[in-house]
Image: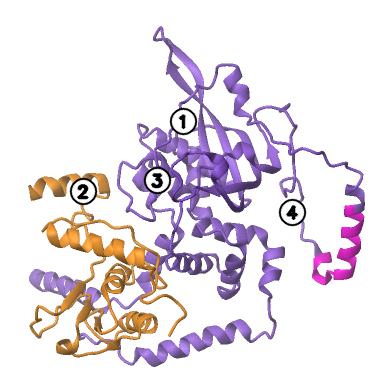
Chain colours: A purple, B orange
Amino acid sequence: MGYVAVKGGTKAIEASMKRVKYDRIKGEKVLDVHTIMSTMSAMVDQVMSESSLYSPFLAALSIKQAEGNMEEAVFLMRAHRSTLPRLYYSQALETKTMLVERRISASFKDIPGGQLLGSTVDYTHRLLDFNLVDESLEKNKRWLKDYETALQENVPSDHVHYYTKVVEYLREEGLFEEYALDNTDPVDITKESLHFPAPRSARLQVLTRGQTGAVTSLGYASLRGYGQVHPTVGEVRVGHVPIHVKHPNEIEDDAENDYYIGKIKITEVEAFVPVNIKNEDHEEELAFEIGYGVCYGQNETKAIAMSILDQCLEHPEYHFPTHDEEFVLLHIDSVESTGFISHLKLPHYVTFQSRLDSVRRVKKGRQ
Amino acid sequence: MHNTHFAFFDESSKKEIRRAILKAVAIPGYQVPFASREMPIARGWGTGGLQITLSIIGKPDVLKVIDQGADESVNAVSIKKLVHETTGVKLTDQTKDASIIQSRHRIPEVPLTKDQIIVLQVPEPEPLRKVEAKEYVTKKITCRKRI
């Protein structure tokens, strides 16, 4: 069998693209982008997080175009991201200033401000709700009205209430070291290629834009036995944080001069991990370190898994793959992994032919 | 033409990639890493070479693309289509007519002139990857060998 190049591919490709469109519209239903935005926020959040592009509208559009295929939606967003000029870096976010919608701690029962459940499916029973098959807009309107009326009994306070970080508890007891602020500029792995050993800022960036499933799997693997990190969730908080940029020509470092450019919704996790440290008298002592997880939108599983992996990578001395930064960081990106796996579908006729040739030659030699 | 910037990328991204190319030309034998951008074509489908092509291409260029040794393989067609749609440049199968040739698996038979640029794609730039999985280690070995 000689080598035959696939020709005439152009027409076949065009026909295949038509087929994609046909399959999407043949059911004669049109899904409005705004419907996706308002009813599929978890998916929108996940797409924004994995594509590192915060835009609910574009994420919803990508979901529509990708027909709900996550890897395809993220791919569309990432490709779009490549076309956008990046003009500014924001000032560092201070999550103490988060407008908290949900904040819980698995480490302390009584935290200042209390456990704020907000919106979570954690305690729902996962039974299919057949009422949703024929959901009525009218009924929903009535429900909303009742809900809002009930809410009016709560008198809003005049001042903005910020929630103290749970880690302050540990600090007060001297169980958590005071670290000096590290104000070195973070590495941006989308502007310079990732090299190893990677600084923590690069690691966190790769983790936060990692594929939810991949980050969760590796975090789970570490927890279950292939790792040395056993965290307690100190705090999960979900809410909006304001973003500011510095005036490009302003020399003075005055936060008052910064521009507010909008807010983003994030999930932030601080996991408390017990570690043995040596005190001044060289005695072993128990202390805590923090595994940090953060991602766009509400995606608590991913943020918790990220906090485990962050802590794993801070301790590379353990010989588990989850503690190996190249193993973790080079394999969790959605676009990289799905792209490389799917390239196997491309014609490899020449590559395979050359492999076949050498196998044949070896066989001939043996006879 | 698509409703994107000329040659898809924003200008500062193109400039960054061109800087890496200049460095590579200036330091023979050194592989210059650059931050790979996500492309509208999947990673592993020739996107490394595509980024080089897009960062150097201009309106008067004429492009030839070879993949799996042929101009008409499905992927070569797809790469050409993307470049054409985002730049409007002329495409060709003829080596002598091309100013930029992006290729995988085949070096054109016709000798090139100094006005022509060949962009050669490889699936894995590190020749030691099959022997050693860790980037940190191969980088060290490669340095030692080259000094």
Q: Residue at x 45, y 26 (%)?
A: A180
Q: Residue at x 49, y 69 (%)?
A: A76
- Amino acid bearing label 4: Arg
Q: Residues within 10 Å of mark 4 (few under 14, many from 20)?
A: few
Q: Disc 3 to disc 4, how far (Cα)? A: 37 Å
Dot 3: chain letter: A
- Label 1 SS: loop
Whether discs 2 and 1 lie on one chain: the answer is no
Image quarter hosting the C terminus of chain A: bottom left
Q: CA–CA distance between discs 1 and 4?
A: 44 Å
User: Percent from the top left, x then y, of residue B56?
Assistant: 26, 72
Note whether A52 is above or below A233 in the view shown.
below
Contact check, label 3 and label 1, Cβ < 8 Å: no
Residue annotated with mark 1: A181
Which residue range is magenta in the image? A131-148
Q: Nearer the viewer, mark 1 or mark 4?
A: 1
